[in-house]
Amino acid sequence: MNNADVHPHNAQIPHHAAHSIPTAPDLLIVGGGIVGLWCALKASRLGLETVLVDKGRIGQGASGGFLGALMPHQPVSWTDIKAFQLDALMSLETEAEWLKSETGIDCAYLRCGRLIPTQTQKKYAERLAWQAAAKQNWPTHSPTGAPIAWNILNDTPDPGWLSSKLAPLGCEFDTMSARINPRRLIEALRKVADATVGIFEMSPVTDLGDGTCVTLANGTKLTPGRVILTAGYQSFELLQPVTGKVLGRGVKGQAALLQPRNPIDPAAPILYRGGVYVIAHESGRIAVGSTSETEFENPFEPTAKLDDIIERATQLCPALEQAEIIERWAGVRPNAVGRQPIIGALPEVPRIVVASGGFKISFGIAHKMADAALGFITGETPSLPVNFKVETHYSRVK
C-alpha cells in the first residue's frame, strides 16, 4: 500500500494510557480530528500545558477520509465568510510547508486548480461575472508566487480527464483551488503535536459540566483551566445538556479511492460538477465523492449511493473507466445550524470554547478556526464572520 493511503489509525505513533492523563492542564481539547489537532499545535506554540482526548482513534471520524479538496467559495457577492476562507486557503500553503520541514511528512499539498464544465449559456454568462469578481476579490498570486485567476476556456484542456461531452461550452478553470492528502496531514499534525501535547485516545467525554470539571467515560475527572470542544458532529450532543439547544447535526458523506487502469497526471486539476468531486492524488490514485445524507442508518457503512457517485464521476472523467476500487469510505461531518462553523465561548459557560461545524470546508480553514478558538482562550477577541459566532447560531435555534 502506498504511504499516502495509510490511515492515521495505523500510523506508528505513541499511544498514551488513560490512567496517565494529567488531570489539571491549562487547556483540554475534546476531539482529535483536523480542528482539534490544529488547536493542539497552536496551543503548544503558546506554551499552554495541553491535553487532547478523543473518544476513539485520532483522525478516525470525518477527518479520516481521502478527498482533500481545498476549493474557494464563488468570488461573487463578497462576504466576510468568503474573506475568512480566502485568508485560510492562502495561509495553508505555507503551513503545509512548515509541517513538512518540521516532521519530514509531505502532506502532498498542491495548488492544482479546478475545472468546472460549462453546459448552458446561462452558466457561461454567470461565470463571466465570477471571472470579473475574482479579479476584484482574489489576490493575483499565492504565497509562493503561483498565479491565481478565474479563467474561462473554450474547450477541455484534456478530454481524457474532463469529458468534452459534459462541457459543450468549454469550462472554467480557477487556479486558486488546491488539494492535500488528508491522512498525511493528520499524521503530520499528530507527530508535531505529540512532542508537547498529551494526546489520549479511547477516552470519551461523557459530561462537560461547566468546564471546571470534565468527566470521562471511565470516571476520570479533569479540572482544566479552559476547554475547547471540537468533537465533530458529536460536539452538538455534548453541548445540548450545557446549552439546552440543538446547535447542529451530523451529515453522512461517502467517497471512494480508485486506481485508474492507465497512469494519470497527479497534478491534474480537481473536477467538480453538481456535487461530484474528482481529485488526482500524488499516489496516482483518484478520489471521488461525495454524498450529503441527513438521514442514514449506519454512518460508517458505504451504500449504493456511493455507486451512483462513482458512476457520475466516471461520466465526468473518462480516466476512471474500468478503474479498480481500492477503498470505500463513509463518515459523518459536523453541520452546525446555518451550515457555517460555530466558533466562540459559550455564554452560559464561557470556560468552554466551541470550534466545530466546518462541514465541507474544514480542511481548508481548520488552522484558522484553531487560531480563533485559541484567541478566546488567551483573552483576545478574534475577528470572525458574523455567521460563525455563537450568538448567531443561538438565534437560529427554534
Image (spheres, helix red, strand yellow):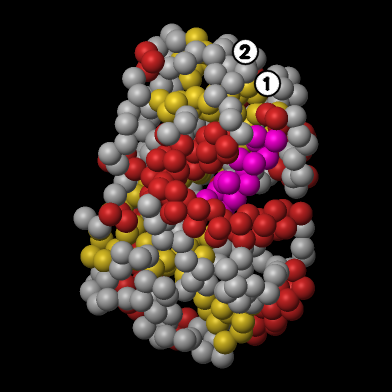
* Image quadrant where residue 68 sits: bottom left
Q: Examine the rendered structure and indicate whether residue 353 appears above or below residue 69.
A: above
* Residue 363 on the magenta span: yes
* Numbered disc 1: secondary structure: loop
CA neighbours of label 1 inside 10 A, class few (<14), some (14 to 19), many (20+): some
* Residue 127 horizontal/vertical position (percent): 67, 78
Q: Main secondary structure of the magenta part?
A: helix
How far apart are the alpha carbons under marks 1 and 2? 7 Å
In the picture, which quadrant includes the N terminus?
bottom left
* Residue 135 horizontal/vertical position (percent): 73, 76
Query: Residue at left 34%, top 20%?
Result: 17
User: Where are the magenta residues, as a range?
Assistant: 361-375
The residue identified by callout 1 is 351
Query: Residue at left 75%, top 24%?
Result: 347
Residue 155 visible:
yes
Residue 212 is labelled as: 2
In the picture, which quadrant includes the C terminus?
top right
- 28, 386: nearer the viewer: 28
Q: Is residue 381 left or right of residue 229?
A: right
Q: Looking at numbered disc 1 in the image, what kind of residue is underneath it? A: Arg
* Residue 78 horizontal/vertical position (percent): 77, 63
First-in-chain label (1 vs 2): 2
